[in-house]
Image (tube, grey):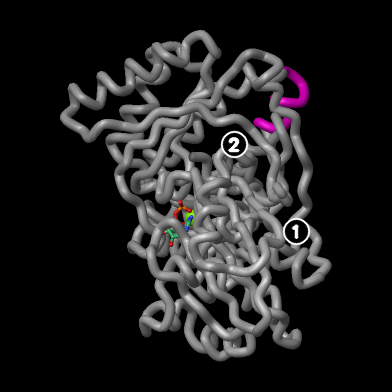
Amino acid sequence: MSAIDDARGLLAGLGAGDPLGVWSSAGRANLIGEHTDYNEGFVLPFAIDRRTYAAVAERSDRMIRVASTFDPDPVEVDSAALAELFAGEPGAAVARGDVPEWAAYPLGVAWAALRGKPAPRGLDIAIASDVPVGAGLSSSAAIEGAAAAAFDELWSLGLAPIDQAKVGRTAENEAVGAPTGIMDQVSSIMGRTDAATFLDCRTLDVESVDLGFAREGLEVLVMDTRVAHSHATGGYRDRRDACERAAAAMGVPALRDVAVSDLDRAAELLDEVTFRRAKHIVTENARVLDTVRALRESGPRAIGELLLASHASMRDDFEISVPELDLAVDTAMSAGAIGARMTGGGFGGAAIALVEHDLVDEVCVGVTGAFEEAGYGEPRTFTVHPSDGAHRDA
Ligand code: ADP
Ligand code: MG
């Protein structure tokens, strides 16, 4: 069964009222620009053809009931009680056990979208997805985007796509309590077929950049190491802190404002580790701009070196890779990939490789074999295609 059918089936199983429709949003892969988002820099992600669906039915009261294929128990909250539920410290409702973490995503979106507005009519929402969770493909943004698209239409909120993305981020930061940037939501919601979303995380200017993968016979292969990552662990927080420290020492609002030519001065001002953290961000921003230029001027085969340089920077300077990700990247390159890099927040998750269509099987076999030889758990490999963002499906 497809995920959209699962969502519909789950909704029917709730004994819900008349179905109102199905909305969905995409997972995303980041082509390049890692950890640059919270440094007010540039990112170049794309929405993928793995989606999260929200099937929604009418209610006659004010209750919002959410169900997911993740959890047999639906969660029900009065829409008038959302403000109280999510008041206080980020993630407090989850920490208190008032809502399970997964439900804080869709309910947090409802809360963030409704802030200051009167309580709307209630809804039953059933969620199902084929975005792998915790693989760095942003199942979190996909669930937020699907919920935001549904609420926007059903409650006539008039939110532009970028505002839906902001609502998703607010839900994730404050209701769930995960300190993430806005890249995931923007790319999940605003993606376009065979294009990447070039986002300036300071101005929130968005441009669609033609990728030409389909036209050129190229595939993006995801190599999911299945090493679990979690934003709750210290690594992500630690890197954010290092970036803030570096920006403060350099006397700028964010590392976005540091140019590659300023790095010599940074080396004098910062301790060795903090310098390497900053160096990754500064050079990664430059690589995003170079990638956009290369795609526009020369096409997708010209970006391989930039992807590899990005991986090396995350491995050596930002230190967020793990041996499994390095092995996936190295093996993909030996098997003939054009470029490869880890994608997502790091400390596990997936790497991507840009591969000629005819070489995909060879790369998959190579990576799987290399993992076996190294004694690592079996990786999951699959291709993804740059796809449309949030929309109504039915
Ligand atoms: P990812 O890299 O996949 O975004 P996150 O840790 O950011 O990883 O988000 C994963 C979390 O999002 C899950 O643990 C769950 O709480 C929530 N989530 C994602 N998809 C769904 C879904 N289909 N149903 C319920 N919760 C979901
Ligand atoms: Mg996420």
Residue 249 appears left or right of 235: right
Residues in magenta, as a range: 291-298
The image shows residue 156, relative to residue 20, as above or below, that is below
Q: Is residue 255 visible?
A: no
Q: How far apart are marks 2 and 1 (CA)?
A: 20 Å
Crowding near pointer 2: few (<14 within 10 Å), some, many (20+)? some
Q: Is residue 194 above or below residue 272?
A: above
Task: Check if residue 297 falls in the magenta segment.
Answer: yes
Classify residue 362 by image quadrant: top left
Tell me the crowding category of disc 1: few under 14, some 14 to 19, or many 20 or more residues within 10 angstroms, Cα based: some
- Tell me the quarter of the picture where residue 248 sits: bottom right
Q: Residue 49, labelled with which disc?
A: 2
Question: Is residue 17 in view?
Answer: yes
Q: Is residue 32 above or below residue 38?
A: above
- 183 horizontally vs 309: left or right: right
Residue closer to the observer: 205 or 315: 205
Q: How many labels does the image show?
A: 2
Which residue is at 40% across, 31% downward? 223
In percent of width and height, residue 256 lies at 64, 54
The residue lying at 50 percent from left, 57 percent from top is: 10
Q: What residue type is labelled 2?
A: Asp
Q: Is residue 302 above or below residue 258?
A: above
Q: Name the residue under label 1.
A: 162
Residues at discs 2 and 1 in contact (Cβ within 8 Å): no
Dominant secondary structure of the magenta stretch? Answer: helix
